[in-house]
Amino acid sequence: MNRIIFALDVYDREEALNLSKELSDNIFAIKVNWPLVMTNGISIINEISRYSKVICDFKIADIDNTNRLITEKAKENGAWGIITHSFTGKKSLNAVVSAAGNMKVFSVVAMSQESFIDEHMDELIKMSIDENVYGLVAPGNRPEILRRIRSMATSLCIISPGIGAQGGNIIDAITAGADYVIIGRSIYDDPQPIKRLNEINKILSDD
């Protein structure tokens, strides 16, 4: 089981496609963010999906109709999964889940840095479970928070950012309850990204 989700937080189309092709055999999925999509258009999702599952890290946080429109566009362009905020409420979250169909919905219940949603985390987890999301986004660099989330959401898939550049440790995150860890800068900023990725995978396989 490969546990790495590669965060493709770059702007350049050729760099994005080259990295996607080079790393695809050694990752679970590729996470794309707004900068890449805004620079190259939403069709870049389809291009990257030729190499790997694509999770759109759009952190949707709007009224239900806008959430639905964004979700539909991600789905139409080949996304495997999408990330949405949950703090906007049940109606907004339900719109994402309903529009997603077979596309996997991941709900943010805590960030990789402290924020006001921390004090509402338990409520957000419960609402996410009630609305039948596929998984949760929980911080890998805050293992005590991650453990709490896992204890409340035993059956949901948890994906965890905050690894590497933000100080999180891969093994700590997996031990605390992450199913997959999200890693970007530690890989694409390395002069030899495939070598660096292989080193990270070895750490996981040796654990």
Image (cartoon, rainbow, N blue to C red):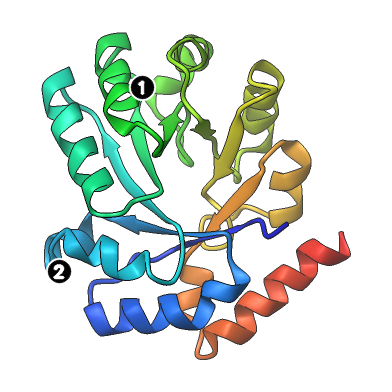
Image quadrant where one finds the C terminus = bottom right
Q: Residues within 10 Å of mark 1 (few under 14, many from 20)?
A: many
**Residue 78 % position (x, y):** 30, 54
- Cα distance between the residues tagged 2 and 1: 27 Å
Amino acid bearing label 2: Asn
In terms of sequence position, does the residue under pointer 2 or pointer 1 come before the other?
2
Specify whether 63 is left or right of 86.
Answer: left
Compared with residue 15, is residue 183 higher up or lower down, i.e. above or below?
above
Mark 1: which secondary structure?
loop
Residue at numbered disc 1 = 86
Residue at position x 31%, y 19% in the image: 93
Q: 30 or 193: which is nearer to us? A: 30
Residue at position x 18%, y 63% in the image: 43
Q: Residues within 10 Å of mark 2 (few under 14, many from 20)?
A: some
Compared with residue 109, is residue 50 higher up or lower down, i.e. above or below?
below
Residue at numbered disc 2 = 40
Amino acid bearing label 1: Ser
Judged from this view, the residue extending furthest toward the right is 206
Mark 2: which secondary structure?
helix
Specify whether 28 is left or right of 78.
Answer: right
